[in-house]
Amino acid sequence: MRLPAALAPLEGPVFRGLWLAWLAANLTMWMNDVAAAWLMTTLTSSPVMVALVQTASTLPVFLLGLPSGALADIVDRRRYFAATQLWVALNALLLAALAAAGLLTAELLLLLTFVNGIGLAMRWPVFAAIVPDVVPREQMAQAMALNGIAMNLSRVVGPVLAGVLLAAVSSAAVFALNAVLAAVALGLVLRWKSAPRTSALPGERFVGALRIGLQHVRQSPRMRVVMLRVFLFFLQASALLALLPLVAREAGGGAALFTLLMASMGGGAITAALLFPRWRQRFDRDQFVRYGTLVCAASSALVALAPHPAVALPATFVSGMAWISTANTLAISAQLALPNWVRARGMAAYQMSLMGGNAFGALLFGKVASFVGVPAAIVAASVFGVVALLATRRYTVEGEDVDHSPAPVRPAPEIAIEIGADEGPVMVTIEYLIDPARAADFAQVMQRTRAARLRQGALSWGLFRDTSVPGRYVEYFVDETWVEHLRRLERFTAADAELRAVRMAFHVGAQPPLIRRYVAEGLVDRPGAA
């Protein structure tokens, strides 16, 4: 029997195994956050310190996300993913030992929560980059929703397990179970046999990979909008999650109520994810983001002001539905905006925006709570979310989905001299002859060409028109080295091929546009030379 549409990607054994590893990895994350947040309430009564647990957990992704994405794009992704799980397992063992010995202080707990967050910063970009390699493009939305289900199923199961262990045993038992689950995820990742990357070129260097990743995101209008949207949304949504332990404590429910509220939020997210195939037939991505933001704001305010858990629990359920609807939609938009060769770096930049909003929101509204109280701080965050949505209503995450599948590899350029791989910079010139009457249209296409060249890693780009021949234009762009120039040819996608065809349609010369390549000549200053 075939699975329902929402679960179809699980029919593939590779995705199924990786999904189980992701589920186990997220169980460790939520259990650690719940145990750390509740343990912090026993170590200090400061709302700022309690909210800082959320900041310490998410800030590493903001600080280290892009370097992690660069590594995930240039090293073996299977080994890298496995290394992240080993990191989390070792940190969980340390937390368990210190908690059992009674040696954890508020400051040390924050530090080790930050160290655990480094594992999250390392693993998220690589997993986001793996998914499009193991599922068909038409199942991408369902696969991303299933990843959201894994995160939110762990949000249900993780807090329940953590709550039971906190009540029946101790926080040390939660951290010990985390170590076991991280080891299980490590084993599942090691079972996956990733396809080796084939290229005759040497691997990218770390600093160059960072530069190109940042440049690609900066030159992608869709990515810029998505990153702004996700930062503002999580700046708003973080307040409820960061202050939820204090909501439960002030309501007199203790750890049991906190666990129920977390589980209710995760249950809402799972319910929404299962309904995505039906909802996506009715709503576009902009509507998902708009309605999700508004519902999240309203339900968060209701949780803060709820007079009884009977009201707060359904409100957190609805908040979870809105949370996953918005986050999943923005993640899909980011995935569809990125080609595979830079996907980990692009998704790392996306995750940096998400976790940056989460970390700074938790810190900001934790500080607000210390002055005006927890309910007022959560309501203030909800009002901010609505105002931010209105202020950015012109920006769309819908756009046209571009085909980033690899185009046939173009042959390496013929050379008449010996060129070292690291020689450069390399300047490429292309001469076009167009109808002068179409100059305005040609300029628009070349503006798109400029963005495409820069996204592929070019250092600079320019377009010049000939003063002696009407309609003759010279395009130039500069690559960092000869090997980077050859690597850019390997990055050619179907979208790049389509743009090239549009560009070539303007050329009216009898011969194709003339392409020349120049390598920088190193000059040595001689004493006394004029």
Image: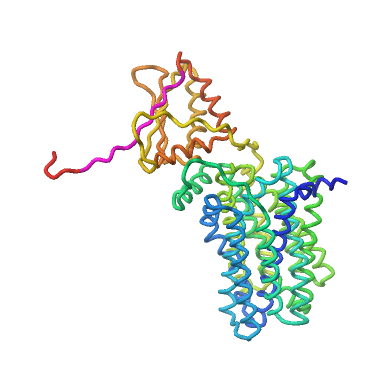
Tell which residue pokes out farthest to the top in this image: 510
Residue found 57% across the figure and 70% down from its top = 114
**Left or right of 259 on screen, residue 407:** left
Res. 255 in view = yes
Locate residue 180: give its quadrant: bottom right
Task: Judge by depth and name the residue closer to the eye, 2 or 318.
Answer: 2
Number of numbered tags placed on the structure image: 0
Q: Position of residue 213 (x, y in %)?
A: 51, 48
Residue found 66% across the figure and 68% down from its top = 242
Tell which residue pokes out farthest to the left in this image: 528
Task: Judge by depth and name the residue closer to the eye, 327 or 374.
Answer: 327
**Left or right of 237 on screen, residue 270:** right
**132 w.r.t. 125: above or below:** above
Colour scheme in the image? Answer: rainbow
Q: Position of residue 51 (x, y in %)?
A: 63, 71
Locate residue 36: give its quadrant: bottom right
**Left or right of 364 on screen, residue 437:** left
Q: Position of residue 124 (x, y in %)?
A: 62, 57
**74 w.r.t. 512: above or below:** below
Res. 231 in view = no
**313 w.r.t. 504: above or below:** below
**Left or right of 24 on screen, residue 213:** left
User: In which quadrant of the rendered image does the C terminus lie?
Assistant: top left
As for residue 514 lying within the magenta part, the answer is yes
Residue found 61% across the figure and 70% down from its top = 368
Q: Position of residue 518 (x, y in %)?
A: 35, 32
**346 w.r.t. 35: above or below:** above
As for residue 431 lying within the magenta part, the answer is no
Look at the image and give the residue range highlighted in magenta: 512-524
Tell which residue pokes out farthest to the right in this image: 1
Task: Judge by depth and name the residue closer to the eye, 204 or 5.
Answer: 204
